[in-house]
Image: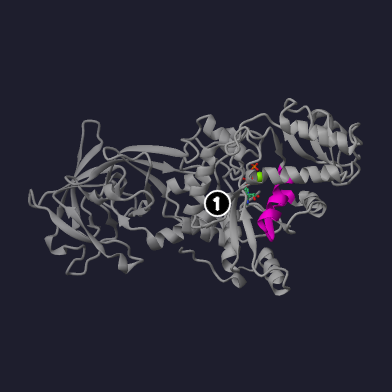
Amino acid sequence: MNVRSPASSERGDFIREIVAADIASGRISAPVTRFPPEPNGYLHIGHAKSICLNFGLAQEFGGRCHLRFDDTNPAKEEQAYIDAIKADVRWLGFDWGEHLYHASDYFEQLYEWALHLVRTGKAYVDDLSADEIRAYRGTLTEPGRNSPWRDRSVEENLDLFERMRQGEFPNGARVLRAKIDMASPNINLRDPVLYRIVHASHPRTGDAWCIYPTYDFAHGQSDAIEGITHSICTLEFEIHRPLYDWLIENLPVPSRPHQYEFARLNLTYTVLSKRVLLRLVTEGRVRGWDDPRMPTISGLRRRGFPAEGIRDFATMIGVAKSDSVVEVEMLEHAVRDVLNRTAPRRFAVLDPLKVVIENYPEGQIEEMEVVNNPEDPSAGTRRVPFSRELWIERDDFMEDPPPKFFRLAPGREVRLRSAYLVTCREAVKDASGRVVELRCTYDPATRGGDAPDGRRPKATLHWLSAGHAVPAEVRLYEHLFTRPDPGADGDLFADLNPASERVLQGCLLEPGLADVPLGQTVQFERLGYFAQDTDSTADHLVFNRTLTLKDTWAKVQAQGRQGA
Ligand code: ATP
Ligand code: MG
């Protein structure tokens, strides 16, 4: 695997410090971490931060990282999500090896441990409804009240819990709760629910179970079974940690994992809530979970973001203990940095204007040698056909140019990249006055684009031979939301950017672009980075604009964006 990662000492975040100290003190010899997605949606760039942290730690310190599906909620989980999550983690460049697990693998063991709590008087079956449990729970300022069912005998609890498992009761009729302290200042310790009755088929265990453990009951115990040393999660779980520790202390688990919390990723112009992303998909606001505007891993991939750029971004943002919002331009900067080094340059014309070179021989075709990547000499050159009739970009010509416009205009000479110097002689218009063709001449002594007398036009344009160009649809993407803090005024969907996708037909590409494989992002010279879309077919090529060429991160940083 080719992961560029600076030495851990350079990164030096608080979690890496903890791991290094645990190794130094002999508590562990190497860290065992896990990435624990719930298969109820696609992974997004926030999950990528967690993946890079968990798998990155294991790599750097010679440990291992498990992929564990937290599949305790059959109502919302699907096999399709499981498959997509695995594909996305692999694509990001990480490998769990043998260590693929599911919380559902542990259902029997978790049930045994629940019985253990019941037998030791530390859990009870409660008949209160969900609403009643909420009402009894109290508030941040008032203690909760004990359920009337709290003091059932161990025998009765064992009997009822067993019958819950056997399917005797309908959904919601009863729950199993830990017996901790209804007056605890931490609401998570006010007799938290450990098991719910859910008559639903599970993607993996089918109809074997109709009671399912809660996140709190499943998570730490799964960590303990797998020998996880550092169970890393986002800050909202900090308040759950006392319960995590209580369960580990009160159960005969085989190891004693510790939970550590870090700040989740927030990005400007971006929403990272699976619930909202699901709504965007189900309401048809986007082309699916992998729409190139979605912040999902699959969306970023379809858009043309390389995995390396996402990993570099994760390194740049680091890992902190308090929440903040990262500028989306920083992600784009990391991606441009990789693409600038790696993306082959190609010619494409998005809004074509015909050029006829009047003094170029009819029927002649020359193969021009063009550099593939000026940043990478090893990328070599390619041959691009040149002929009498060409396409250039419509906005590279102005009939009456203002002072700072140096591109083509009547009487002006420009360079056609790696081809010739050409001079515009006449703009041909249709009846409506629209320019439909430029009549130009070329200087045959300038083959390759350089004049022997050293004259240097101020502009260099990209071009395509009309007889060779390949038609394509090109989709231009902008941020999905119009403001850095979508939904801050209360209506998230009102902040959707109506111009987030613009579809252009009749674009033209250099011939070889038909063969660019999916996943290979190229630079259309002067226009931006583009990647072939999954909608592309042999008859109808579709390319997505990954990013424009202009890096705005430094500017955004200098301005210091308000409210972000
Ligand atoms: P849900 O509301 O469905 O639980 P979730 O985003 O927490 O959504 P999980 O599948 O539970 O999704 O997340 C898997 C892991 O990714 C968790 O450890 C979680 O803390 C982490 N994670 C989720 N969102 C972010 C984020 N924005 N930044 C960093 N880590 C995240
Ligand atoms: Mg979660």
Can residue 312 be seen?
yes
Is 127 placed above or below 520 here? above
Of residue 514 and residue 489, the one placed in the foreground of this image is 514
- Direction from residue 513 to residue 107 in the image, left or right: right
- Direction from residue 84 to residue 63 in the image, left or right: right
Q: Which quadrant of the figure has residue 315?
A: bottom right
> In the rendering, at what x and y percent does residue 170 appear?
73, 25
Of residue 368 and residue 538, the one placed in the foreground of this image is 538
Q: Residue at x 32, y 57 (%)?
A: 345
Q: Residues within 10 Å of mark 1 (few under 14, many from 20)?
A: some
Q: Which residues are magenta?
A: 215-237
Can residue 187 be seen?
no
Q: Which residue appears farthest toward the bottom when viewing the image?
A: 24
> In the rendering, at what x and y percent does residue 313 appear?
54, 58
| Image quarter where ligand 2 lies | top right
Secondary structure that dominates the magenta span: helix
Of residue 123 and residue 264, the one placed in the foreground of this image is 123
Q: Which quadrant of the figure has residue 20?
A: bottom right
Q: Residue at x 91, y 40 (%)?
A: 143
Find out whether residue 236 is within the magenta segment. Answer: yes
Amino acid identity at mark 1: Val
> In the rendering, at what x and y percent does residue 303 appear?
43, 46
- Direction from residue 492 to residue 547 in the image, left or right: left
Which residue, given by chain and number where applicable, does mark 1 sit on? Answer: 328
